[in-house]
Image (cartoon, rainbow, N blue to C red):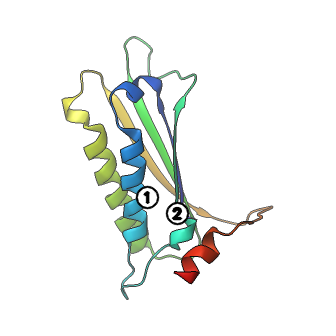
Amino acid sequence: MPHLTMLYTADLDAEIDFDGLVRQLADILCQQKDEAGQPVFPIGGVRVFASPAAHAAIADGAGRYDFLYALLRIGRGRPAAVHRAVGDALLAVLQKGLNPGRRERPIGITLQIDENQGQVYQARSGTLHAHFHEH
C-alpha cells in the first residue's frame, strides 16, 4: 500500500487527461516523507487506479453533474500529521487536474483516506517490492 482508487463520471474522460492525472498522483505518493525525511510509503506498494463509473446517480438528477470519488487505503500506524499532509498533497493535484472553477458543469470531488484495520484476508505475491529493494 498505498492504493488510491478513483471512480468518476464517464463524461470526464473527454475532458481530463486521466493517464497524466494518475501518474501525478502516484508521483505525489512516492514523494511523501515523514518528519525524519524517510519515505512514508514503500515505492513498490504505490498503486493509483481510475475508472469511469458505468452507472451513477448524482444529487437531484435535474442537471448534468460530475463527480470524482477517491479512496486512499494505507496501512496502520502513521501519525495524523502524515494523513493530513498526504491528503492535502493529493487534493491539490486533484483540484488542479479537475479544475472545478473553470468547468461548465458542477463537479463534486471527494477524497477519503482509510487505514487498513484488521483485514480478514490478505495475500501478496509477485516481484514488484523486491524489484525496488534491489535498485
Number of numbered markers: 2
Q: Quadrant of the N terminus?
A: bottom right
Q: Nearer the viewer, residue 23 or 57?
A: 23
Q: Residue at 37% of width from left, 70% of height from top?
A: 31
Question: Vertical placement of 118 versus 100: above or below?
Answer: below
Q: Nearer the viewer, residue 134 or 90?
A: 134
Q: Position of residue 131 (x, y in %)?
A: 59, 74
Residue for badge 1? 26
Question: Vertical placement of 102 versus 129: above or below?
Answer: above
Q: Position of residue 74 (x, y in %)?
A: 56, 64
Which disc is residue 46 wearing? 2
Q: Residue at 74% of width from left, 63% of height from top?
A: 119
Q: Amino acid at mark 2?
A: Val
Classed neighbour count for the residue bearing mark 1: other residues with Cα under 10 Å, few (<14), some (14–19), many (≥20): many
Q: Residue at 36% of width from left, 46% of height from top?
A: 20
Horizontal side of residue 36 vs 9, given as left or right: left
